[in-house]
């Protein structure tokens, strides 16, 4: 497993690659921490997953 950090708009985001043949996985909690100053990252992620457009995307993707 390889970990690396990318920086997007001054936000450091962890990226994990499980093996050479696998995809990269980004840490959405790193993004959520920056997105909200008062609430926890878990609450931000929970709201993202309840969002209508997110549900439509996931339905299409599956």
Image: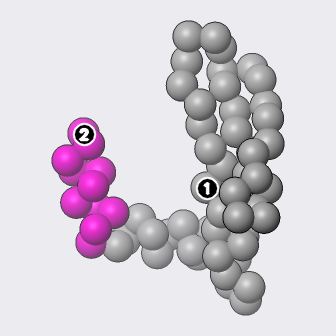
Q: Which mark is residue 62?
A: 2
- Quarter of the figure that contains the N terminus: top right
From this view, report whether residue 39 is shown above or below residue 59: below
Whether the magenta-drawn stretch holds residue 58 is answered as yes
**Residue 37 at x, y percent in the picture:** 74, 85
Instruction: Identify the residue at the far bottom of this view.
Output: 38
From this view, report whether residue 18 is shown above or below residue 20: below
Q: Residue at left 28%, top 61%?
A: 55
Q: Which residues are magenta?
A: 52-62
Label 2 packing within 10 angstroms: few (<14), some (14-19), many (20+):
few
From this view, report whether residue 36 is shown above or below residue 15: below
Q: Which mark is residue 28?
A: 1
**Residue 32 at x, y percent in the picture:** 64, 68
> Quarter of the image holding residue 57?
bottom left
Which mark is first along the chain, 2 or 1? 1
Label 1 packing within 10 angstroms: few (<14), some (14-19), many (20+):
some
Left or right, 24 with respect to 8, comes to: left
Q: Residue at left 62%, top 44%?
A: 26
């Amino acid at each position: 497993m390889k970990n690396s950090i990318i920086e997007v708009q001054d936000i450091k985001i962890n990226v994990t690659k499980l093996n050479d043949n696998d995809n990269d996985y980004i840490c959405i909690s790193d993004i959520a921490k920056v997105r909200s100053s008062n609430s926890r990252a878990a609450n931000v992620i929970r709201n993202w997953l309840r969002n209508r457009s997110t549900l439509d995307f996931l339905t299409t993707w599956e």
